[in-house]
Image: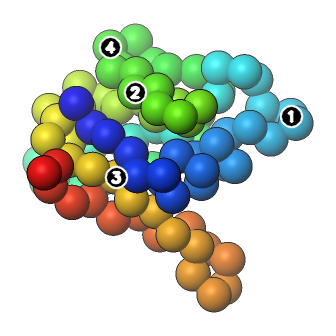
Amino acid sequence: MLTLTENASTIVRNITQQPEAPESAGLRITSDDATETFAVTASPTPQPGDQVVEQDGATVYLDQRAAELLDDKILDAAVDPEGRVEFALGPQS
């Protein structure tokens, strides 16, 4: 199952725990079946069939294809100097 670094957990919490967001809000990762590219969006709730990953107060929803592709990965995140969030994937050790 996908795991999150401490930085990723913190950034996901910051994105999804805004005052106007529901308690069920999470970061949703989807994958195009034709390629191994991912889309990341904030989502108020999981979609039917999503795998839910909860770690250190952060919630990530993975569609079926993303869950398969990311099963043995670690999600990391950082904020660049312009304030944009950048995500990176690495292998679990």
Q: How is the image coloured?
A: rainbow
Crowding at dot 4, Cα within 10 Å, few <14 / some 14-19 / many 20+, comes out as few
Q: Is residue 29 left or right of residue 78?
A: left
x, y (%) of residue 4? 39, 45
Give the residue pinned by disc 4.
Answer: 49
Q: What's the CA distance linking mark 3 and mark 4?
A: 21 Å
Q: What's the CA distance linking mark 4 and mark 2?
A: 13 Å
Looking at the picture, which amino acid does disc 2 mark? Val
x, y (%) of residue 43? 59, 33
Q: Which residue is at 88% across, 36% downward?
A: 19
Nearer to us of marks 3 and 1 is 3
Q: Is residue 12 left or right of residue 2?
A: right
Q: Which residue is at 27% across, 50% downward?
A: 74
Q: Which mark is residue 48?
A: none
Looking at the picture, which amino acid does disc 3 mark? Leu
**Disc with the residue nearer the chain's start (3 vs 1):** 1
Give the residue pinned by disc 2.
Answer: 53
Q: Secondary structure at mark 1?
A: loop
x, y (%) of residue 26? 57, 33
**Disc with the residue nearer the chain's start (2 vs 1):** 1
Check contact, mark 2 vs mark 3: CB within 8 A: no
Crowding at dot 3, Cα within 10 Å, few <14 / some 14-19 / many 20+, comes out as some
x, y (%) of residue 90? 21, 60
Looking at the picture, which amino acid does disc 1 mark? Glu
**Disc with the residue nearer the chain's start (2 vs 3):** 2
Give the residue pinned by disc 3.
Answer: 75
